[in-house]
């Protein structure tokens, strides 16, 4: 870690990597809690892996891969959301098929592009150390879009996430806001591609939010805590990966997974102690 802090003051690419982690963490904190509360991790995974098709097509036609990723993610979100609403009984199989098709299309397009191997690894596992300045601006714009959407429709999203039937009774257009939420998930996925890649993006989207949910009692507090945890995890993972030259994305996810397991164990121990105190309290008052 000391070597990392020294290099951080000298190298602009490390400063940009930290900024990329911060921007990705903002998206995680804004949207991750809704994914966890709504329990749509599998749907988010289908959206994430379908993105490779758009990225592969963009690379093949000489366009910006992130633009292709954004278009493919939004299209996949609307398609997967519509499938869930229409075919509730077979949604898992259908989403799995779309997941596989998206990745297969992406691999085929990338395989037809010269020098595809390096790009493919970068897309799948991310490369936070090579985020250019223009993509930082793109990530900041996506964060702004997410923030505006959450601020404008926070109550509607909360109603849809916790109880769709109650939201319908209150006159909330559930279908519209459900699909909009999935579109925001798609935007968040694109936001995090450069940091951890498509394979690991769902872990970064959900693990900080899941940890935050174990220690907070409101969705707003959960969102803020998830942002802080995401920032801490990306920064620490980047620092730990620097000296031994480890891949930063997997290092960040290992930290997030370890933190989740420790948090879950701590919550379990706390609950057991509460139960024990509740059982002992009546006998001590007699």
Image: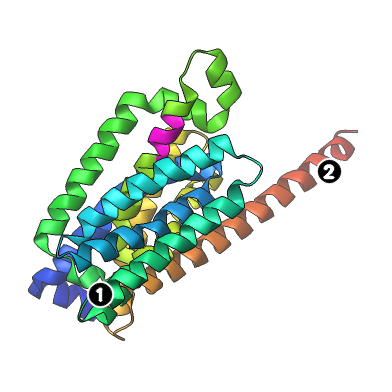
Per the image, the residue denoted by label 2 is 280
Residue 126 position in % (x across, y down): 30, 69
Residue 224 in sight here: no
Q: Is residue 228 left or right of residue 84?
A: left
Residue 8 position in % (x across, y down): 15, 72
Per the image, the residue denoted by label 1 is 119
Residue 157 position in % (x across, y down): 44, 29
Determine the residue located farthest toward the bottom in the rendered image. 244
Q: Is residue 47 left or right of residue 240?
A: right
Q: Nearer the viewer, residue 49 or 98?
A: 98
Q: Nearer the viewer, residue 182 or 90?
A: 90
Residue at x-position 26% and y-position 71%: 127
Q: Is residue 282 above or below residue 159?
A: below
Q: Nearer the viewer, residue 21 or 58?
A: 58
Residue 279 position in % (x across, y down): 84, 42
Residue at x-position 60% and y-position 56%: 264
SS label for mark 1: helix
Residue at x-position 38% and y-position 68%: 252
Indicate the quadrant containing the C terminus: top left, top right, bottom left or bottom right: top right
Q: Is residue 42 above or below residue 277?
A: below
The residue stretch that appears in magenta: 177-182
Asked whether 57 falls inside the magenta stretch, the response is no
Mark 2 and mark 1 lie on one chain; the one further toward the N terminus is 1
Q: Report how far apart the C-alphas of labels 2 and 1 lie in the structure.
A: 61 Å
Residue 269 in sight here: yes
């Amino acid at each position: 870690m000391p070597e990392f802090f020294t290099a951080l003051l000298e190298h602009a690419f490390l400063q940009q990597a930290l900024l990329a982690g911060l921007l990705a963490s903002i998206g995680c904190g804004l949207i991750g809690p809704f994914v966890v509360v709504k329990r749509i991790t599998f749907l988010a995974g289908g959206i994430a892996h379908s993105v490779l098709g758009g990225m592969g097509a963009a690379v093949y036609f000489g366009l910006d891969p992130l633009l292709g990723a954004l278009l493919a993610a939004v299209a996949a979100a609307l398609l997967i959301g519509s499938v869930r609403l229409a075919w509730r009984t077979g949604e898992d199989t259908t989403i799995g098929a779309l997941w596989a098709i998206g990745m297969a299309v992406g691999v085929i397009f990338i395989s037809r592009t010269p020098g595809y191997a390096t790009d493919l690894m970068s897309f799948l596992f991310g490369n936070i150390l090579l985020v250019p300045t223009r993509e930082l601006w793109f990530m900041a714009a996506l964060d702004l879009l997410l923030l505006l959407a959450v601020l404008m429709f926070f109550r509607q999203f909360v109603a849809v996430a916790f109880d769709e039937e109650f939201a319908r009774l209150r006159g909330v257009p559930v279908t519209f806001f459900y699909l909009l939420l999935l579109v925001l998930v798609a935007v968040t996925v694109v936001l995090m591609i450069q940091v951890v890649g498509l394979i690991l993006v769902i872990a970064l989207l959900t693990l900080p939010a899941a940890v935050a949910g174990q220690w907070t009692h409101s969705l707003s507090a959960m969102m803020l805590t998830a942002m802080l945890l995401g920032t801490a995890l990306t920064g620490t993972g980047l620092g730990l990966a620097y000296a031994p030259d480890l891949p930063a994305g997997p290092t960040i996810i290992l930290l997030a997974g370890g933190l989740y397991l420790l948090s879950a164990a701590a919550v379990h121990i706390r609950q057991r102690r509460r139960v024990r105190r509740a059982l002992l309290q009546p006998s001590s008052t007699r």
